[in-house]
Image (spheres, grey):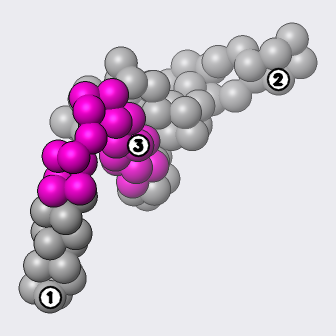
Amino acid sequence: MSERYKADRFREKLYEVEWLSGFNMRSYRGFCGVEHMKFKGLCCKYLVDWRDLLLKYYSGRRVISPIKVVEEVDWIIVMMPRNKLREIVQL
């Protein structure tokens, strides 16, 4: 990434924090939830490239419906459950 891009993103976050300072805690929590979802989306984007590595750790199958069964690793990449997020990022 270019240094300018990093500086622009940092400045954007500073503006968001300044903007949020005028709101109550409820608005701040909503903002954090949105940022968390963005982070999960970013992780999913990169995990597609690391599917083979994840397959070593999550090799089972998951029943989605009575007629639909998918690989556990594919379900994790698509859904990115919150309880697995830290574990997966560490891998």
Rendering coords of residue 35 (x, y %): 34, 46
Q: Compared to 12, does 57 lie above or below?
A: above
Q: Which residues are magenta?
A: 17-42
Q: In which quadrant is the N terminus drawn? A: bottom left
Residue at x 34% of width, y 42% of height:
31
Q: CA distance from mark 1 to mark 2?
A: 47 Å
Image spot of residue 46 (x, y percent): 39, 56
Relative height, residue 26 to residue 50 (above, below): above
- Residue at the right extreme, as displayed: 67
Residue at mark 3: 34
Please name the residue that numbered disc 2 is placed on.
68
- Disc 1/disc 3 C-alpha distance (Å): 25 Å
Q: Secondary structure at mark 1?
A: helix
Amino acid marked by disc 3: Val
Q: Amino acid at mark 1?
A: Arg
Residue 11 percent across, percent down from the top left: 14, 72
Residue 4: which disc?
1
Kindly report the distance in space between the C-alpha atoms of the residues bearing marks 2 and 3: 30 Å
Specify few, some or many for label 1: CA neighbours under 10 Å numbering under 14, 14-19, or 20 or more: few
